Amino acid sequence: MITRIDHLGIAVRSLDETVAYYENALGLHCEHREEVPSQKVRTAFFSAGETHIELLEPTSPESPIAKFLEKNGEGIHHVAFATDDIAAQLKGAANAGVKLIHEVPFEGAAGKLVAFLHPKSTHGVLTEFCMPKAD
Ligand code: ZN
């Protein structure tokens, strides 16, 4: 079951410049920074109530975020829904005819299990499911 929007992923060219914007202009506090080698990104997290903002800066031209920036410029990259059962959520989406990018969840930022649905079958929104690790 989806329990809430966990975070919005936002693609940026410079993590430092964008962190400064969220801190100075919006008054949010950067809570956590982390590099995620599997996705070739550096991330920074903010809380806005129960929902988080995940800034994503590519660490390599091969990063999916680098490709996104090239094509679209900076902006919202994905919407992440928190779920209490990521395997069931993926199965439900697949059964509904959605194309999955990841059939098996992998470890994303902050040790959460994550998996993405293909934007071609989600009406244009790259959709992530995420779930805190059980142990
Ligand atoms: Zn995300």
Image (tube, rainbow, N blue to C red):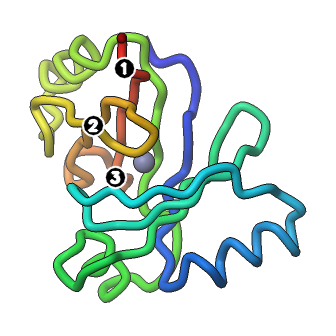
Q: Amino acid at mark 1?
A: Lys
Secondary element at image label 1? loop
Q: Is residue 82 left or right of residue 93?
A: right
- Which label lies toward us, 3 or 1? 1
Residues under labels 2 and 3: Cα distance? 18 Å
Q: Looking at the image, which is closer to me, 90 or 107?
A: 107
Asked if disc 1 is less than 8 Å from ligand 1, the answer is no
Secondary element at image label 2? strand
Q: Which comes sooner in the sequence, label 2 or label 1?
A: 2
Say few, some or many: other residues with alpha carbon within 10 Å of mark 3 (under 14 / 14 to 19 / 20 or more).
Answer: some
State the quadrant of the N terminus: top left
Q: Looking at the image, which is closer to me, 86 or 15?
A: 15
Which residue position holds label 3?
Answer: 126
Q: Residue at x 43, y 19 (%)?
A: 83
Which residue position holds label 2?
Answer: 107
Q: Which comes sooner in the sequence, label 2 or label 3?
A: 2
Secondary element at image label 3? loop
Q: Is residue 134 left or right of residue 88?
A: right
Q: Residue at x 41, y 45 (%)?
A: 109
Residues under labels 3 and 1: Cα distance? 22 Å
Which residue position holds label 1?
Answer: 133
| Residue 54, position as x, y percentages in the image | 54, 55
Which quadrant would residue 23 be assigned to in this image? Answer: bottom right
Asked if 112 appears above or below 85 in the picture, the reply is below
